[in-house]
Image: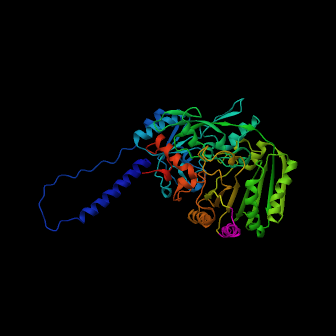
């Protein structure tokens, strides 16, 4: 029995049993004689005609119990391995995606989209009860991974390409695009949510480099969104989380690949408060060619709580010391560790950040034969505008200390600097809602595969809650959290209203909306 048949059958049995109990409790006080007829029982809804969908596509369709289903449904976070999506369609073409959208409309089947499989709330797993996601058809885009870098520098990238595939392809042509440091993240999801990464302050968000998309609309038609057509859809795809269609291809404007110097610093944890206070003032106002991430880490990977900084500098290496001196002066303390690696190539640095130094692109994966492994984790986020005082910094330090007692592999608070090129564009130029913020913040807890996620979920959300008095409710869409009370405002700020209007016009039924944005 397929998962659809089994779940429909169990639901029907449960409903029938409840109805019988109610009927037994509803006898009239005085016996009466009435004419009766056999009760009419509505048949259970028909299961979707999956074979009809299979006949329309050139990709593959996997149903529960069939060969390949377990592998096809797997996402990057093993905490969601128990998910049972209705089916997984591994798309081979944009037309496969269009056929899936049409089929879902005809069969009244909910669907979700998977690019890299990194959704923090597990949406791309296709079945997350606690996040309000019923079993759904997963439209998996990872087969759409072709990349072409044109002589003009434009990069046309399939929506299923991983970040490391993009770095490998554009780097080989002497070009670069700003992005994150996780090798297996899908470039489509990264871009649609904004795209914060190690070159953000120098070149802007990943979505700032986006020039056009191909997408499948709610009626199953394949459209182009660019400055010349469907401009509102392109605006929504540049940091607004998409949700106006399924993007199948993205066109980026790349830049010449820079030479990069990287620095790693570590302080005594007793100096954490002055370092935090100094960093938050220095980092977002530093030369735009300098990006940094400040991390407070603890857990089994560390002997004790620690505070570290990683710096990426695209200017002349000889000028870096002068740039970092401002941090040391403001903190009033020097690091215990100061490791500098000058004049490295773009490709070398991106692969090193991704944990794939010396690893071929096709092995920089968690799949079969890959050099990387999946890890179970909980996470949520903040996007702060107000600088912390000493009390606020002390709360962050306390969370790090508490994290060391949690029993996690690692807990972390990561502050990634904004400013620079991010602030150069007007706040409403794209849908990204936090150009005026000074950082994005991620709270994480990594734990043993198979462990109960509840205490780790509670920990990261308590960390966020403890900082709300200092940082408010802002959050980053790509670090999704299904418990936010006003996700539109938290993720997109003053751009939320226009985004909602565009989504309503493009997708009146809300078929592309993530659970937090569904109206019914």
254 relative to 184, above or below: above
* Left or right relative to 417: residue 376: left
The one of 445 and 202 positioned closer to us in this rendering: 202
> Can I make out residue 93 in this image?
no
Residue 363 lies in the magenta-colored region: no
The one of 116 and 320 positioned closer to us in this rendering: 320
Q: How many marks?
A: 0
For the view shown, which residue lies furthest in the left direction?
33
Residue 164 in the image, given as x and y percentages of width and height? 69, 43
- State the extent of the magenta-drawn residues as a range: 387-405
The one of 44 and 123 positioned closer to us in this rendering: 123
Residue 405 in the image, given as x and y percentages of width and height? 66, 70
For the view shown, which residue lies furthest in the right direction?
318
Residue 120 in the image, given as x and y percentages of width and height? 58, 54
> Can I make out residue 413 in this image?
yes
Q: Main secondary structure of the magenta part?
A: helix
Instruction: Name the image colouring.
Output: rainbow
Residue drawn at point x = 53 percent, y = 46 percent: 499
- The quadrant in which residue 179 appears is top right
Residue drawn at point x = 27 percent, y = 60 percent: 20
For the view shown, which residue lies furthest in the front direction?
426
- The quadrant in which residue 300 appears is bottom right
The one of 101 and 152 positioned closer to us in this rendering: 152
* Left or right relative to 129: residue 468: right
Residue 424 in the image, given as x and y percentages of width and height? 69, 46
């Amino acid at each position: 029995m397929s998962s659809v048949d089994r779940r429909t059958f169990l639901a029907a049995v449960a409903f029938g049993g409840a109805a019988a109990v109610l009927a037994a409790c509803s006898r009239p006080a005085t016996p009466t004689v009435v004419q009766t007829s056999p009760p009419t029982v509505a048949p259970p809804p028909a299961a979707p005609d999956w074979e009809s969908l299979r006949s329309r596509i050139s990709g593959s369709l996997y149903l529960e119990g069939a060969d390949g289903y377990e592998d096809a449904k797997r996402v990057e976070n093993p905490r969601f391995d128990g998910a049972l999506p209705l089916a997984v369609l591994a798309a081979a073409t944009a037309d496969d995606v269009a056929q899936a959208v049409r089929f879902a409309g005809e069969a009244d089947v909910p669907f979700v989209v998977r690019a890299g499989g990194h959704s923090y709330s597990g949406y791309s797993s296709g079945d997350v009860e606690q996040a309000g996601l019923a079993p759904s058809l997963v439209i998996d885009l990872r087969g759409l991974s072709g990349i072409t870098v044109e002589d003009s520098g434009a990069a046309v990238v399939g929506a299923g390409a991983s970040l490391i595939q993009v770095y490998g392809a554009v780097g080989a042509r002497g070009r670069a695009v700003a992005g994150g440091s996780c090798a297996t993240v899908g470039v489509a999801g990264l871009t649609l949510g904004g795209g914060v990464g190690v070159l953000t302050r120098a070149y802007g968000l990943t979505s700032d480099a986006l020039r056009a998309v191909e997408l499948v609309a709610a009626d199953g038609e394949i459209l182009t969104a660019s400055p010349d057509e469907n401009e509102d859809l392109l605006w929504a795809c540049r940091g607004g989380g998409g949700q106006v269609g399924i993007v199948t291809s993205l066109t980026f404007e790349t830049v010449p690949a820079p030479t990069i110097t990287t620095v790693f610093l570590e302080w005594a944890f007793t100096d954490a408060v002055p370092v935090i206070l100094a960093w938050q003032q220095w980092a977002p106002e530093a030369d735009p060619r300098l990006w940094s991430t400040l991390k407070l880490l603890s857990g089994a990977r560390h002997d004790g709580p620690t505070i570290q900084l990683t710096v990426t500098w695209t200017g002349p290496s000889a000028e870096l010391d002068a740039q970092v001196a401002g941090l040391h002066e403001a903190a009033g303390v020097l690091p215990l560790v100061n490791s500098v690696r000058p004049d490295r190539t773009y490709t070398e640095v991106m692969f090193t950040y991704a944990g794939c130094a010396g690893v071929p692109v096709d092995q920089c994966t968690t799949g079969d034969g890959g050099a990387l492994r999946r890890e179970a984790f909980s996470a949520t986020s903040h996007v702060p505008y107000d600088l912390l005082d000493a009390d606020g910094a002390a709360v962050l330090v306390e969370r790090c200390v508490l994290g060391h007692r949690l029993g996690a592999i690692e807990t972390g608070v990561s502050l990634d600097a904004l400013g620079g090129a991010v602030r150069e564009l007007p706040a409403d130029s794209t849908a990204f809602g936090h150009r005026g913020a000074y950082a994005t913040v991620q709270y994480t807890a990594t734990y043993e595969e198979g462990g109960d996620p509840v205490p780790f979920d509670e920990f990261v959300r308590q960390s966020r809650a403890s900082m709300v008095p200092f940082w408010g409710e802002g959050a980053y869409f790509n670090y999704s959290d299904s418990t936010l009370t006003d996700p539109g405002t938290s993720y997109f700020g003053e751009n939320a209203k226009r985004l909602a209007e565009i989504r309503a016009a493009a997708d009146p039924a809300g078929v592309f909306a993530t659970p937090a944005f569904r109206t019914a």
